[in-house]
Every structure is written in C-alpha cells, then in structure tokens.
Amino acid sequence: SDLRKKSATLLDKEIKAQLAHLNMTSVNFVTQFTPLEKFDIRGLESIEFLVSTNPGQPPKPLAKVASGGELSRISLAIQVILANTSTIPTLVFDEVDVGIGGSTAEIVGQMLRNLGSRGQVFCVTHLPQVASSGHQHLHVNKQAENGSTFSQIYNLDSGQRVNEIARMLGGIDITEKSLAHAKEMLEAI
C-alpha cells in the first residue's frame, strides 16, 4: 500500500508534465486511494483517477469530468509514461486527436511516433499533423456495393502518402501549395 501511494505520487506528477506538453496546463491529476473494509484482490484500497480540467475546480472521477478530447489526451499521456515499463506489444488509438488541432496535433503526432519506436502503434486519425508523424501510413476506404459494405486498407507509398496528406490539408481539390505543404510536413519528421 505504501509503495502504491509513493508510485502514484510520482505517476501523478509525470502525467501532469505530459499533459502540459499537450497544452493542458491547468489540469490537476490525482490518484485517489479509498480504504476497503477488508483486504481483497485490489489490495487494501480501491484506486481511482481524479481530474480537474479547470483551475479552481476540485478533482472529480476522470470518466465524469473529461470530454472525449481530454480523455484521449490523458490516455495518451498515461501510455507515454507507462511505455517505459510496459510489455504491451501493440497500442491502438482511435482518434486520440479529437478536439485538437494545430501545434497540439503536431505534439500528439510526435508522442505517438515516439511510442512507435518502443512497440507497434495503430492510430486512426483525420489530422494531417498526426498522420504525417507515422512510420507508415495506411488508408482505409469503405465502400458499399450490391447491398454490402466492405472496407479496404492500403499501405501508401511515399507519393501516395504526400497526396493523402495534401488531401487532409486542403480538402477535395489538391493544389500545388497543399502538395508542397504535405511534402514539407513529411520531410520534417
């Protein structure tokens, strides 16, 4: 129990630091320990993550206060910290970048790429800043044909990847400027 509490204090501090990198500087993250009436499989206490996303508000259970985008970033911060000791070979993030953009999206992309150097990471994204950070880029295409729906997955080569990042940046009409920006994003990684 003492070791858990000591580790939790360190974990809380590291999570807050990671969240600051993700432009969540006002977040207060606390691991709460509630004593149990008797020892069970959880130990001497139950543990719950509490969070306050706005200054002056008391921390409340994570699932009740955080928005989808905040939950995604908190999850990413936790995974980044735990990756140093984790033996999980594959992580899957489904739109971890919900509700963010710009520089925060670029930071998320960098964090995911860093995680990918320790194990396999799959990330579903619609943001070019995140997609351009990957080691590989898969494109998922869903089609309906003869009353059935099916999905196809393509591994994009470097030229296709530039075009896809340009499409993500500029929409339907891919311009020379969006292509140049896509190339610049991919070269910066």
Image: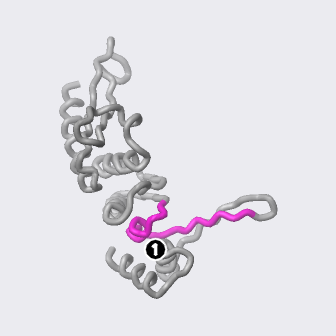
Quadrant position of the C terminus in the picture:
bottom left
Q: Amino acid at mark 1?
A: Leu
Q: Relative to 75, is 31 on the left or the right?
A: left
Residue 132 part of the magenta-drawn span? yes
Q: Residue furthest bottom?
A: 176
Q: Residue at x 36, y 81 (%)?
A: 184
Outermost residue to the front: 56
Which residue is painted at 34% across and 46% down in the image?
Answer: 74
Residue 45, quarter of the rendered image: top left
Q: With 142 as the anchor, is 64 left or right in this view?
A: left
**The residue tagged with tag 1: helix, strand or loop?**
helix
State whether residue 135 appears in this view: no
Residue 155: image x %, image y %?
A: 54, 71
Q: Is residue 21 left or right of residue 106?
A: left
The residue located at (44%, 65%) in the rendering is: 127
Residue behind mark 1: 169
Does 173 sit above or below residue 137?
below
Image vertical order of residue 22 relative to residue 61, above or below: below
Query: Which residues are drawn in magenta?
Result: 125-144
Choose top left, top right, bottom left or bottom right for residue 117. Answer: bottom left
Q: Position of residue 50 (x, y in %)?
A: 31, 34
Q: Is residue 142 visible?
A: yes
Q: Nearer the viewer, residue 102 or 123?
A: 102
- Give the quarter of the figure containing the N terminus: top left
Identify which residue is drawn at 47% across, 61% down: 125
Left or right? Give the position of 67 relative to 14.
right
Vertical relation: 56 (above or below) 120: above
